[in-house]
Image (spheres, rainbow, N blue to C red):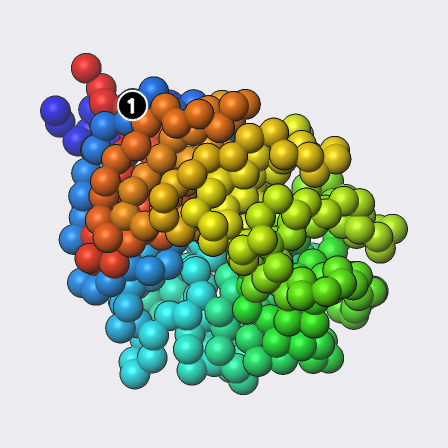
Amino acid sequence: MKPVVVLLALLGAQESGDWPTYHGGFALDGVSAAELPDAPARLWRFKAPARVELTPVAAGGRIFVACDKGILVALDLAGKEVWKAEVAKDTFASPPLAVDGLVVSGTANGSLVAFDQASGKPRWTYAVEGTVQGSPNRVALAGGKKGIIAVSQADGTIHAVELETGKGAWKTEPIERCDGSPGIGDGRIVLGSCASALHVFSIEKAAKEQDIALGGDSQVAGGVAFSGKTAFAGTRSGSVVAVDVAGGKVLWTNTDTKREAFTTPAVNERLVVFGSDDGRIYGLRRDTGAKVWDFDTEGKPASPVIAGKRVVAAAGGRLFLLDLETGRKTWSADVSDHLTSPAIVAGMIVVGADDGTVTAFGKESR
């Protein structure tokens, strides 16, 4: 089969091939309109120059892979290398963000670095003054400017950076250690912390609006998914919460799992899907938080995503497709020893692995 034939078939599978963050759009809701085949075929496998522990992202017909040793690789949709860049004496700590012609990622030494999507040339570096573990995200700055936010892991300070120049626009007061990624929506930034709370910031005012206490052993170390005016997050105690961000109140709490739930939930109009350290993927009713189904992966799930009528999940080295309504397994494949969470790119499932590979699954053209 010729790669160009595969490529054209995949481009028609969904309206947009972009997957700008590790969990889809800037809201981190983890939802794609792509309709995946019942039994996806392996389309290609790329051997990266180092381990791949961060989820690939995609924009403008390119897939961007942040590898160990500070190496960033751009691939085309057929899995061929386009360019390679690296950060000197540092390594990537956060999943990258692909937006507005740039690829931006945080590093272990506390830098936010931006590369040109087309060429891989460095564009700017900004000092966050602390490891950036959660994904950078995209915001609109005052005066119509485009911006990037990054959170310092050590104290939860949010840094807003001008996209074009890499200059700091504003930063907030520290709140508490933050290990996860902030969701963006309704003019707000929402992130969780080790203070067992969700913190809500106004983008326009560049200031905190409120802290929403979750109670108990409810530290949040995963990403916060935003949908409408509601934020969804998992906690250390295993509880998953839905929070009315504007009203500042917890709408419901699900406690079906007692193990850590640090994956980022995937949220559509009906269901909330998340993975727990008990090895299970759970599907909850969005309106009440009641459990609809659960599926035992027999591993440790990464953040699942919703693609059309399917849930796509990785656990250990295995990739799964589940029926969204019932949680029933419809397909699985062994890929490696340990996988990243999946990205949905131009109708393909794309995952990185600890053996230094990136693999794409999808519909073969006949």
Does 105 sit left or right of 161 as displayed? left
The residue at the point 36 percent across, 48 percent down is 299
Q: Is residue 58 visible to us here?
A: no
Q: Is residue 212 visible to us here?
A: yes
The residue at the point 26 percent across, 30 percent down is 7
The residue at the point 63 percent across, 80 percent down is 155
Percent coordinates x, y for residue 177 in the rendering: 61, 76
Does 251 sit left or right of 71 as displayed? right
For disc 1, the marked residue is 39
The residue at the point 47 percent across, 43 percent down is 280
Percent coordinates x, y for residue 109 in the rendering: 42, 82
Task: Using the image as rendered, state which of residue 146 and residue 88 is in the foreground.
Answer: 88
Does 265 sit left or right of 49 as displayed? right
Q: Which quadrant of the figure has residue 195?
A: bottom right
Does 127 sit left or right of 77 as displayed? right
Q: Locate the N terminus by quadrant.
A: top left
Residue at the far top in the pictured view: 366
Percent coordinates x, y for residue 53 in the rendering: 33, 60
Look at the numbered disc 1 and give the secondary structure of its residue: loop
Badge 1: residue crowd in 10 Å (few <14, some 14–19, many ≥20) = some
Q: Locate the C terminus by quadrant.
A: top left
Percent coordinates x, y for residue 208 in the rendering: 79, 68
Query: Which three-letter amino acid code belongs to the residue tagged 1?
Result: Ala
Residue at the far right in the pictured view: 247
The number of discs equals 1
Task: Using the image as rendered, state which of residue 54 and residue 316 is in the foreground.
Answer: 316
Q: Which quadrant of the figure has residue 35?
A: top left
Q: Which quadrant of the figure has residue 182?
A: bottom right
